[in-house]
Image (tube, rainbow, N blue to C red):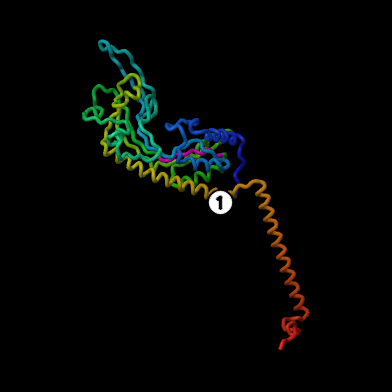
Amino acid sequence: MKPNPPIPPSFTAKKSTILASLALPESSYTDLSPKGTVDAALRPLIDRINALDGLVTTSSCAGRVSVFLEGRKQGLHINSTRDGGEDDAEREGQVAVPGGKGMGGRWLFVSHEMVRIAGREGGEERSAMKLFGLSESHKEGKALGLDENVKSMRSVRFQFEPMILHIMSASLHHAQPILAAAINAGFRESGVQSLKNLNDPNAFPMVAIRTAGLALESLIGFMPDNMINEPSQDRIEGEVQSMVSEEYLTLLLKLANERFDMNTERIKRFEEALFQRETELEPAWEDAKTRKERKMAEGLKQQELLRRNQIEGQGNRKSRTNLDRGEDNHTLVGTLPVSR
């Protein structure tokens, strides 16, 4: 099988920088994710991948349950009146597509592990609605966002997202085993990115490991958007209203927990497939001393095998010489003394 091409020095430099960042203590490390750290469930897999030549992880998420308040919509104008009803300000909200993280978009809840709500907390029964920062509205029109004073609504979405993992590779040859293992493990929407930069010596193929088959999303609430400025966290509490019942939220959590289990199983299959394939494709790494000892042992074994073949060959030639002289087995036996 054709070996992988040599690893460019620029890739080695990038990998060293990433590994140095990952080696920081958790108290010092931070990234752009809501959690800000590497998920503990993925850390062993990430360390194994980063120990392979020509590969380095760049971003990851083990899977999560989240509740997200989307940002303001594009082109939104909000008027505020005071002192006799005259307009005091008119502002256009920052661009944010539906479901986007534009102005005001924020996480109301995030968990990278299964969520259990059974039991009591502070003397009260725990509830999904309280956990997600939602308030239940009993006014039908208000619950549906039909209040005439509300100029716009911002949706609240419940989501389960399975594992996503990005691995930068030194070449397409290094990327191929990763992609094959991912697809075979059930991450069927995986692919290779950054192909348009193949002519750039400082750009390398990126393998994105992901699946849409386990994803779950549901609209569960809204927040009236009738304020000029983005409200503080304290002002948001009580403003985010649920559109569904507590029983429905509990059902969503049950489904998300089941998908957490399936996600964990696929991650396990991916790891097994990847490292089984790596074992088949490449011999185990060994330092110079170990390799020298192995080669010496193999040489001695070859010499011993050759010596035995030579001895056996000499024995066969001697037997053939005796037969040519007429000294067959009967003659040789007849010369032996007979005991009586």
Residue 200 showing in the rendered view: no
Q: Classify the position of the C terminus by image quarter.
A: bottom right
Kindly give the residue lying farthest to the front in the view shown: 123
Q: Nearer the viewer, residue 119 or 309?
A: 119
| Dot 1: element | helix
Q: Relative to the observer, which residue lies in front, 241 or 206?
A: 241
Residue most extreme to the bottom: 340
Q: Position of residue 40 (x, y in %)?
A: 46, 39
Query: How many tags in the picture?
Result: 1
User: Please, which residue is most extreme toward the right here?
Assistant: 325
- Answer with left or right where residue 164 lies relative to residue 145: right
Left or right: 236, with 195 as reference point: left
| Residue drawn at point x = 56 percent, y = 42 percent | 51
The answer to whether residue 168 is magenta is: yes
Report the magenta stretch's main SS: strand
**Residue range of the region highlighted in magenta in the rendering:** 162-169
User: Looking at the picture, which amino acid does disc 1 mark?
Assistant: Glu
Image quadrant where residue 87 sits: top left
Q: Nearer the viewer, residue 225 or 132?
A: 132
Q: Could you tell me residue 181's position as x and y percent?
A: 49, 47
Name the residue carrying label 1.
280
Does residue 338 belong to the magenta stretch? no
Image coordinates for residue 58, horizontal then vertical, percent: 51, 36
* Above or below, 127 relative to 274: above
Q: Is residue 167 visible?
A: yes
- Please state the horizontal and vertical placement of residue 162, each as a whole percent of the image: 41, 40
Residue drawn at x 29%, y 37% as measured from the top left: 120
Would residue 299 appear left or right of 164 to someone viewing this image?
right
Badge 1 density bin: few <14, some 14–19, many ≥20, Cα 10 Å: few
